[in-house]
Amino acid sequence: MTEKRIPITFYDEKTRPCPQLGGDVPFKYCRTKDDDLPCDNVLACWWDRFDIADFIGRHLSEADIARLLGPQRRNLASLVKLIRQADQTVDACPGR
Ligand code: SF4
């Protein structure tokens, strides 16, 4: 739950090789590739660079997450929802 207050542009300058394009691309490209929604492969491509699932969960609506994941992977949208609920529970704990 470390991504809570970071802006959506926080990781935009990070780069990684793109398996589709062949060269390095900045995260901003991956984040906005499909009509301002992330590339379909964003979770698979960025999981080892930072907590991309958490980042997506905090910056996209549930409808956009479901659209991003497609019908076969909607259970991940449910996972993001659970992450949000858990985070709200932690925030509600006294002393935080
Ligand atoms: S998320 Fe998409 S655009 Fe970005 S590196 Fe992966 S395949 Fe390329």
Image (cartoon, helix red, strand yellow):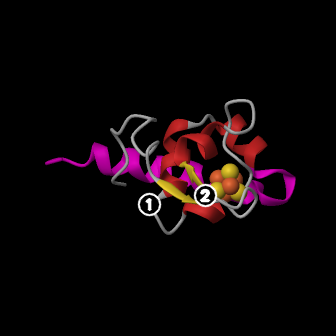
Q: Is 3 or 37 nearer to us in this picture?
A: 37
Q: Is residue 83 visible?
A: yes
Q: Secondary structure beneath disc 1?
A: loop
User: Residue at position x 82%, y 50% from top?
Assistant: 70
Figure disc tally: 2
- Amino acid carrying mark 1 in the image: Phe
In the visual, does 7 lie left or right of 18?
left
State the quadrant of the N terminus: bottom left
User: Residue at position x 67%, y 31% from top?
Assistant: 36
The boundaries of the magenta stretch are: 69-96
- Amino acid carrying mark 2 in the image: Leu
- Residue on which disc 2 sits: 79
Work out whether 13 lies above or below 60: below
Residue 85 drawn in magenta: yes
Is the residue marked by circle 1 packed among few (<14), some (14-19), or many (20+) residues within 10 Å?
few
Residue 80 drawn in magenta: yes
Work out whether 62 lies above or below 44: above
Q: Earlier in the sequence, mark 2 or mark 1?
A: 1
Hey, which residue is sitting farthest top in the picture? 35
User: Residue at position x 33%, y 38% from top?
Assistant: 5
Magenta-drawn stretch, dominant element (helix, strand or loop): helix
Q: Secondary structure beneath disc 2?
A: helix
- Residue on which disc 1 sits: 50
Q: Is 25 or 63 nearer to us in this picture?
A: 25
Image x and y of residue 88, in percent = 39, 44
Hey, which residue is sitting farthest right in the picture? 71
In the visual, does 68 lie left or right of 80?
right
Picture quadrant where residue 43 is located? bottom right
Q: CA distance from mark 2 to mark 1?
A: 17 Å
Hey, which residue is sitting farthest left in the picture? 95
Work out whether 91 lies above or below 54: above
User: Residue at position x 55%, y 56% from top?
Assistant: 53
